[in-house]
Image (cartoon, helix red, strand yellow):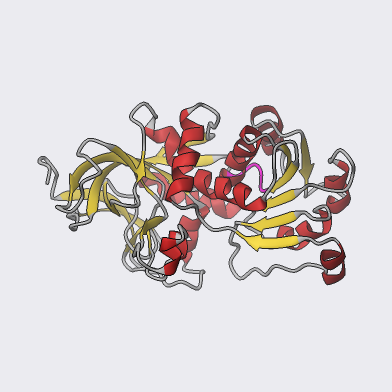
Amino acid sequence: MSQNIPEKQWAMVIEKTGGPVEYKEIPVAKPGPDEVLVNIKYSGVCHTDLHAVNGDWPIPTKLPLVGGHEGAGVVVARGELVKDVEIGDHAGIKWLNGSCLACSFCQASDEMLCPKALLSGYTVDGTFQQYAIGKAAHVARIPKDVPLDAVSPVLCAGITVYKGLKESGAVPGQTVAIVGAGGGLGSLACQYAKAMGLQVIGIDTGAEKEKMVKEELGATAFVDFATSKNVVKDVQAATADGTGPHAVLLVAVNEKPFQQAAEYVRPRGTVVAIGLPAGAFLKAPVFETVIGMKTIKGSYVGNRKDTGEALDFFRRGLIKAPFKTIGMSELQKVYDLMHEGKIAGRYVVDTSK
């Protein structure tokens, strides 16, 4: 164990389903034999964190709960079995806090599907606190030359969309449509897609998001779903041959886009569902899906290898997560903006405020 670790810390705590989140002092936990304690400096705010507050997913949350799963900081203590993480290392605590490492899924590098998976900010306390626990095998290794505030959104949003792009099977030169392109996930998906050699069609709404997606994130086209008279035709028209994108990444937080994607993706194209609107369903026209040989699939978070790859894109300067910093005590303001659909990019909380 390291020294100079306080007994108490500040955290944002959910005492009951539906909130509110409370800024209060709680004890600092001690790491178990295979765990590390990370002094969280910054934590990105993900839409999943709002689902944790509302309890509207079919997975029960721990209560009381400290949310957050995009925490970047410094390792200050480690358990006696931990040999490959040093005190002073920079590390990230992700959505997948830990897994058994022994089941068939873990052995196949699908540890996110482990039936005993621990989920940060959902089934175990997360990163909206100054000191957080993570399984040493699963914490992200962050190079020390990488800024901790800027990298924090990559720990969930970045890894998740990078994994989705890999799952889509799209190859350099092909086109991918990103639904929700101006949000936290989408803004990163646009950049990863471009860095992977893909052409991007951004789908979202609002002048601010359109400007960001086209001018800052490198999309070749933008379709505003709120003003378009026919989203399906407009997305197809934005592709070179008019037959639609080779892949669609659905990172939206509403159900309707999930119903449209199978209509405008090209034959042999792939629709990848990533966003998780509460209670939503995927629907597709059977005839067109069959004769077009279209694929519809889900993509969850990345594994440890995906994490390293996603972070390397960021380290090389190919990914710049648009973010705004806010004090951790002001987290409720971010949730309110999420409710109103007014967030462009990502918010990052500073745990010292």
**Left/right of residue 256 with respect to residue 341 in the rendered view:** right
- Foreground residue, 305 or 148? 305
Q: Quadrant of residue 72?
A: top left
- Expressed as whole percent of the image width and height from the top left, the position of residue 166 reads 60, 48
- Expressed as whole percent of the image width and height from the top left, the position of residue 157 reads 52, 46
Residue 53: tell me if it is visible: no
- Expressed as whole percent of the image width and height from the top left, the position of residue 4 reads 11, 40
**Left/right of residue 193 with respect to residue 120 in the rendered view:** right
Residue 269 versus residue 148 in the image, above or below: below
Q: Main secondary structure of the magenta part?
A: loop
Q: Which residue is at 74% across, 69% downward?
A: 283
State how many labels appear.
0
- Foreground residue, 83 or 249? 83
- Foreground residue, 238 or 257? 238
The residue segment tinted magenta is 179-183
Q: Which residue is at 36% across, 32% downward?
A: 143
**Left/right of residue 241 with respect to residue 206 in the rendered view:** right
